[in-house]
Image (cartoon, helix red, strand yellow):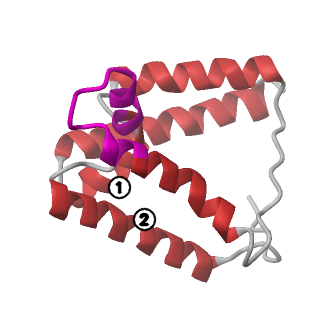
Amino acid sequence: MTIDWTHFTPFAALIGGALIGLAAAMLLLWSGRIAGISGIVGALLRPVHGDILWRVAFVIGLIAAPTLYRFFAPLPEVQINANFLNVVLAGGLVGIGTRYGAGCTSGHGVCGISRLSLRSVIATLSFMAAGFVTVLVLRHLVH
């Protein structure tokens, strides 16, 4: 493994991570809610009266942030090295895993681990291990 030093941005990553942590902490402290994206979006599919506005605002913020960012700096180039069917299949598997894991990487990895939740540590280790194995198999053994 090599590091692409020309595109390595540790300070930008540190600032971004700190902002994500701050936003997750603010949501938890002010509303008692976990900033798990799958739970926030999933609850919009089965809305409960009085529990919609903050979820819509959160999703709008997820979309608005990179939209506003592009006025101050160029967005990174996105390159997907997979065909459409593989992207759809991967998205479906992530969705299924999110349901079975009772949360996603943002809920377990960011919010759960910071609350010292053993369940979240195990879930995040499982997510990461599955990702490592998938990359190993698809990029190095099958390809």
Q: Find the magenta span and give its range.
A: 39-56
- First in sequence, mark 1 or 2: give its number: 2
Q: Which mark is residue 20?
A: 2
Quarter in which the C terminus is drawn:
top right
Quarter assignment of residue 76: bottom right
Contact flag, marks 1 and 2 (Cβ < 8 Å): yes
Amino acid carrying mark 1 in the image: Val
Camera-side residue: 128 or 1?
128
* 132 with respect to 118 (left or right): right
Percent of width and height locating residue 30: 17, 63
Circle 1 SS class:
helix
- Find the distance from the CA under tag 1 to the CA under tag 2: 8 Å
* 56 with respect to 87 (left or right): left
Secondary structure mostly taken by the magenta-highlighted segment of the chain:
helix
Few, some or many C-alpha atoms within 10 Å of disc 2 (few <14, some 14-19, many ≥20)? some
Asked if residue 36 can be seen in this view, the reply is no
Few, some or many C-alpha atoms within 10 Å of disc 1 (few <14, some 14-19, many ≥20)? many
User: Height in image: 1 above or below 131?
Assistant: below
Percent of width and height locating residue 71: 74, 73
Q: Is residue 123 magenta?
A: no
User: Height in image: 112 above or below 5?
Assistant: above
Percent of width and height locating residue 38: 40, 35
Quarter assignment of residue 99: top left
Residue on which the image places disc 1:
110
Picture residue at 67% right of the left edge, 60% below the top: 67
User: Height in image: 70 above or below 10?
Assistant: above
Percent of width and height locating residue 95: 48, 23
Picture residue at 74% right of the left edge, 21% below the top: 86
Q: Is residue 43 magenta?
A: yes
Amino acid carrying mark 2 in the image: Ile
